Image (cartoon, rainbow, N blue to C red):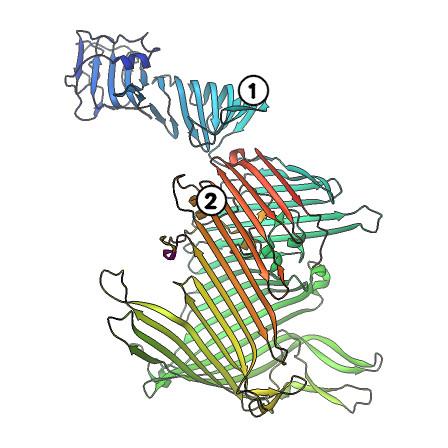
């Protein structure tokens, strides 16, 4: 045996020899190096199992340098493995696998020249003559799928024909690729695209030559955009595409357009900072030829298993008209959003969370960059930042430090409290047994301690973040020690009793006096420590009554269960008139009125009059046991007929008049397999009213009326249905949880699309439809199902407190989405106000999935927000600047409300 072969051990068995004609045709560049005829010193075998090839020293002759294997080799093939000892070649045929060092190669045929240390791989023909089994070359994270490949295992150089490779979102195909080393590839006849099908892409960029540096860049010569194999006039003399496994910094190309009100504009241009894989920053800006401008800073951060969050700051200067003219105006608006959440497992004893949404009250009504009608309809912005800590002591203690903010966008009133301190000590049972359950009045006796401290500021939108907002800051601390117990009476009655002692500290009070200088009553703020103490007592007796009505077991309804929860409660609060004073309301001082210096303080004033209130409540719910015809076990199923039907009223024994309060009724239920939600609330007053509409101490029936007088009522109905519901022959699908932030809710709007879908002009890559609807739009063309969903919300409010008998609100809102065909999704949102007799906000939405492209069109046909928006662009973030967008909006002038 030749000395060069003794370094390799093969498992070989006999099979037919030589390449097929298909193999010879597949390797025209290999035939110059290989003799594919059978030779007498060629051994042909059939493989049994993959064989590890290792050097075996059995000869005294020293081999030539470079012919020794540097690592174990693994090879296998389905049809045969052939060793050509004369030409120093190993051939693997049909589903061939070759592994050596850090690379793996699979193909229809593989030839290894161990003398030159080169590997050749290509396709083979199947039974009908089609070339199959493309080579797949893997080295590290790189995967190449060519038609054929020639690779030197020592120098790592390679020549690849018709290579196909994927890098992040990029699919690259080249007629010929030369690998110089692991860092540089030269390509000829290159197509690169983000389309999934690299052989038949719907679009691609074509260039004659390119240089590919893995993990860094692709540099090309003259590049032309081709759509559906039709060259476009869009081209570049050269192109540079940055590539990285991580996010990289770079410029963001703005969109351009014009409006009559603000002139020509460049919008959403800026720079993206990829600081690390944990935090980034996007800076965007707008500029208008008539002076308006905007700045937007967005940042996202995340630390795995610790926390994640995002921050968004928007500032806009809106200029209308020409300077020096009466119609000129200049307004500044801003909005700050911050969301932070901590992983539940990061620290079980402490937690930090933030949800911030504050800014100009009229921001969402006037912003140039965000269109979210839901946030415009929402009159309240709110924020909360908190840190809580649990001390694992006995008893356990909890401390929370927070800052809160609420803002009414109509009145522009802002309430901000910071810092807030909440502390509590868990309940202590001093008489409870060490072992066993607690029983009776004494053993269930418990007490705890609570502390609440606040520093609160009341201000307006115009004074926010200015020194004036701190002029009338209120601060105070409230301590409370509740003492409670519970026990059973007559086995079925549950009794709970509690008493509460509260001490309140404040740092300012108010004095009232009559001023001779101004000839009116003045209120003077006194800064200084003051305090008051209060206490109260309450008890509650309740029980639960079960009633079951059984029917025929063969009937559809087999039983109905009625659960009642009656309760009677009594609350006693004494008078604390020691904290009340008098002041004169005229210059003579003959007329005096009482007031408390604690009125207007952070926690308010204590009760001046004694309170003895007895309250009554009755809760009901109804369930049915029905026959389940679809059950395999024959067991009936339970359904809720009425989730709740609650009655409540109260009687104040200490009141001088109007002791009996109105009867309040609340009910809610779900119908049509929980698709329809019905809520009802009403108020019935047993007392009559006089001609001025004021309540009087006389029963309504004694005043010539009915037993009770309907003073108010409200009804809300929400109905959601879809083609996937069993009612329409579909199968219900569970909602898929998603980490994607709902843009409507993020901007202060609704979670549904009854007020339309928000459009963030700074990020048009996101779809207007949720992920489920986009997946439904990709169904087969011949699928006869047309997925759809419909949401209805009806609200009615009635008021008759002063015999006005008027409907104050009666409106219907409707939204729906339909998948017309594969790739086409449409949606609408509209409504009708029956009281004012007019169509409410309406939005029409259309979206087309163009595989690697996305096109959408939204239209608001009427109202203040009348406009349309069109967008078409590549989905992938790598090529997100390749887009076209156009919009036309009504010339909206700045609105304060």
Tell me the distance, in whole angstroms, between the alpha carbons under discs 1 and 2. 40 Å
Residue 622 vs residue 391, the one in the foreground: 622
Q: Residue at x 27, y 60 (%)?
A: 630
Q: Is residue 734 above or below residue 836?
A: above
Task: Give the number of marks.
Answer: 2
Residue that extends furthest to the left in the rendered view of this protein: 14
Instruction: Write down the quadrant of residue 116 in the picture.
Output: top left
Q: Secondary structure at mark 1?
A: loop
The answer to whether residue 70 shows anywhere in this view is no
Q: Is residue 629 above or below residue 883?
A: below
758 left or right of 189 in image: right
Residue 833 appears anywhere in the view? yes
In the depicted structure, whether residue 17 falls above or below residue 326:
above
At x 50%, y 47%, the residue is 769
Q: Quadrant of the N terminus?
A: top left
Q: Mark 2 — residue?
A: 820
Does 725 appear in magenta?
yes
Closest to the observer: 839 or 238?
839
Q: Which residues are magenta?
A: 723-727
Q: Say which quadrant the C terminus sits in.
A: bottom right
In this figure, which residue is indicated by the disc labeled 1? 222
């Amino acid at each position: 045996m030749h000395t060069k072969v003794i370094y390799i051990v093969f498992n070989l068995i006999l099979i037919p020899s030589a390449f097929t004609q298909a193999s010879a045709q597949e390797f025209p560049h290999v035939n110059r190096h290989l003799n594919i005829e059978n030779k007498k010193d060629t051994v042909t075998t059939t493989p049994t199992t993959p064989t590890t090839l290792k050097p075996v020293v059995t000869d005294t002759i020293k081999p030539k340098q470079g012919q020794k294997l540097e690592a174990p080799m693994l090879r296998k093939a389905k049809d045969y493995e052939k060793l050509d000892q004369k030409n120093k070649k190993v051939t693997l045929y049909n589903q061939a696998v070759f592994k050596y060092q850090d690379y793996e190669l699979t193909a229809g045929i593989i030839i290894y020249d161990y003398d030159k240390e080169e590997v050749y791989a290509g396709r083979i023909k199947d039974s009908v003559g089609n070339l199959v089994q493309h080579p797949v070359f893997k080295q590290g994270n790189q995967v190449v799928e060519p038609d054929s490949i020639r690779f030197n295992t020592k120098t790592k150089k390679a020549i690849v024909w018709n290579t196909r490779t994927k890098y992040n979102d990029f699919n690259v195909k080249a007629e010929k690729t030369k690998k110089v080393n692991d860092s540089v590839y030269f390509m000829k006849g290159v197509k690169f695209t983000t389309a999934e099908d690299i052989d038949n892409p719907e679009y691609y960029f074509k260039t004659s030559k390119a240089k590919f540096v893995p993990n860094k860049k692709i540099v090309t010569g003259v590049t032309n955009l081709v759509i559906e194999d039709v060259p476009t006039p869009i081209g570049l003399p050269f192109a540079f595409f940055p590539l990285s496994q991580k996010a990289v910094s770079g410029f963001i190309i703005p969109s351009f357009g014009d409006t009559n009100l603000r002139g020509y504009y460049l919008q959403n241009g800026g720079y993206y900072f990829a600081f690390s894989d944990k935090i980034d920053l996007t800076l965007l800006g707008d500029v208008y030829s008539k002076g308006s401008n905007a700045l937007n800073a967005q940042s996202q951060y995340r630390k795995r298993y610790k926390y994640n969050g995002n921050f968004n700051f928007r500032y806009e200067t809106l200029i209308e008209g020409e300077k020096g003219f009466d119609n000129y105006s200049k307004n500044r608006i801003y909005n700050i959003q911050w969301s932070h959440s901590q992983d539940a497992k990061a620290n079980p004893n402490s937690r930090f969370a933030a949800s911030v949404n504050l800014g100009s009250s009229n921001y969402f009504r006037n912003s140039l960059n965000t269109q979210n009608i839901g946030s415009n309809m929402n009159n309240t912005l709110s924020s909360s930042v908190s840190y809580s800590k649990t001390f694992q002591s006995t008893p356990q203690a909890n401390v929370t430090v927070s800052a809160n903010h609420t803002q009414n966008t109509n009145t522009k009133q802002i309430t901000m409290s910071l810092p807030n301190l909440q502390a509590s000590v868990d309940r202590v049972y001093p008489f409870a047994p060490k072992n066993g359950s607690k029983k009776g009045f004494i053993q269930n006796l418990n007490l705890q301690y609570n502390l609440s401290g606040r520093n609160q500021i009341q201000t307006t939108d115009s004074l926010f973040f200015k020194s004036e907002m701190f002029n009338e800051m209120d601060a105070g601390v409230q301590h409370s020690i509740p003492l409670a117990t519970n026990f059973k009476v007559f086995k079925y009655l549950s009794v709970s009793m509690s008493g509460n002692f509260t001490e309140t500290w404040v740092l300012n009070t108010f004095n009232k006096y009559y001023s001779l200088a101004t000839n009116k009553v003045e209120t003077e703020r006194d800064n200084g420590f003051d305090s008051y103490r209060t206490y109260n007592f309450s008890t509650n007796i309740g029980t639960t009554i079960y009633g079951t009505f059984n029917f025929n077991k063969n009937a559809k309804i087999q039983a109905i269960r009625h659960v009642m929860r009656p309760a009677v409660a009594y609350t006693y609060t004494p008078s604390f008139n020691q904290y009340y004073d008098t002041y004169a309301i005229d210059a003579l001082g003959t007329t005096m009125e009482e007031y408390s210096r604690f009125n207007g303080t952070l926690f308010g004033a204590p009760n001046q009059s004694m309170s003895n209130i007895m309250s009554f409540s009755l809760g009901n719910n109804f369930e049915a046991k029905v026959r389940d015809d679809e059950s395999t076990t024959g067991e009936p199923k339970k359904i809720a007929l009425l989730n709740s039907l609650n009655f409540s009223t109260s009687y104040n024994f200490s009141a001088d008049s109007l002791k009996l309060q109105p009867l309040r009724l609340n009910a809610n239920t779900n119908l049509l397999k929980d698709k329809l939600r019905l809520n009802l609330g009403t108020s019935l007053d047993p007392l009559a009213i006089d001609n001025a509409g004021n309540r009087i101490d006389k029963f309504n029936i004694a005043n010539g009326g009915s037993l009770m007088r309907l003073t108010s009522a409200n009804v809300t109905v929400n109905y959601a249905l879809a083609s996937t519901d069993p009612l329409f022959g579909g199968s219900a699908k569970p909602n898929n949880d998603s980490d994607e932030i709902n843009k409507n809710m993020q901007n202060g709007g609704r979670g549904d699309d009854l007020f339309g879908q928000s459009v963030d002009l700074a990020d048009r890559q996101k779809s207007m439809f949720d992920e489920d609807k986009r997946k439904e739009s990709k169904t087969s063309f011949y699928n006869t199902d047309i997925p759809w969903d419909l949401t209805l919300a009806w609200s009615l409010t009635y008021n008759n407190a002063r015999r006005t008998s008027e409907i104050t609100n009666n409106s219907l809102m409707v939204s729906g989405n339909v998948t017309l065909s594969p790739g086409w999704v449409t949606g609408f949102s509209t409504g009708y106000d029956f009281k004012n007799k007019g169509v409410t906000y309406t939005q029409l939405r259309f979206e087309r999935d163009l595989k690697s492209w996305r096109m959408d069109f939204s239209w608001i046909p009427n109202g203040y927000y009348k406009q349309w928006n069109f967008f078409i662009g590549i989905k992938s973030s790598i090529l997100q600047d390749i887009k076209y967008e156009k919009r036309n909006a009504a010339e909206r002038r700045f609105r304060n409300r």
